[in-house]
Amino acid sequence: MTAVCRRATEQDVEHLYELILGYSLQGIMLPRSRDMLRNQLHDFVVAEAEGELIGCGSLTQLGKELVEIRSLGITPSYKGKGIGTMIMDELLDMARDRNLTRVMALTYEVRFFEKNGFEVVEKDIFPEKVWTDCIHCSKRHACDEIAVLKILES
């Protein structure tokens, strides 16, 4: 199996929607509408193998130097094969290209992020995240996600 990572295109919207929906139904990823995905396509990368979309991830800029990795997910049958790390590397390159030095995520997959050079941190060091997104989340008073951060070398 040879997988490639590339920027998302309009043709990927339905596959992105389905992949993210699967995770959101499990309560481990926020849902995204098709319109939202179309509007944010420039921030998404996808992984594909044998013509099939098998993973995705996106970046959302939260501040002057801070960006968040969002919607990072892999089709279950492809987990554990390096696809997540391949997507992560592409997202980190995008952050570097945009001169963003702080990359954060809220996650349940702490070991994966630590394996990729992130450190666990307190959520409250990200007021940009708390006041733009968390304030609207149903879990805001009982958030069980873990905050992670990676500082990129400029």
Image (cartoon, helix red, strand yellow):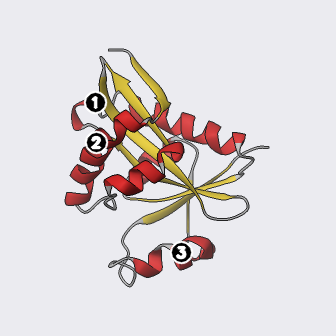
Which residue type carries mark 1?
Tyr
Between discs 3 and 1, the one toward the N terminus: 1
Q: Quadrant of the C terminus?
A: top right
Name the mark on residue 78.
1
Disc 3, SS: helix
* The one of 124 and 20 positioned closer to us in this rendering: 20
Disc 1, SS: helix
**Residue at horizontal 63%, vertical 36%?**
93
Reply above or below: 53 against 147: above
Disc 3 from disc 2: Cα separation = 26 Å
Reply above or below: 126 against 110: below
Mark 3 crowd level (few <14, some 14–19, many ≥20, 10 Å Cα): few
Q: Which residue is mark 2?
A: 14
Q: Quadrant of the N terminus?
A: top left
Which residue type carries mark 3?
Thr
Residue 44 in the image: state x and y as whole percent: 48, 43
Side of 110 relative to 120 (left or right): left
Mark 1 crowd level (few <14, some 14–19, many ≥20, 10 Å Cα): some
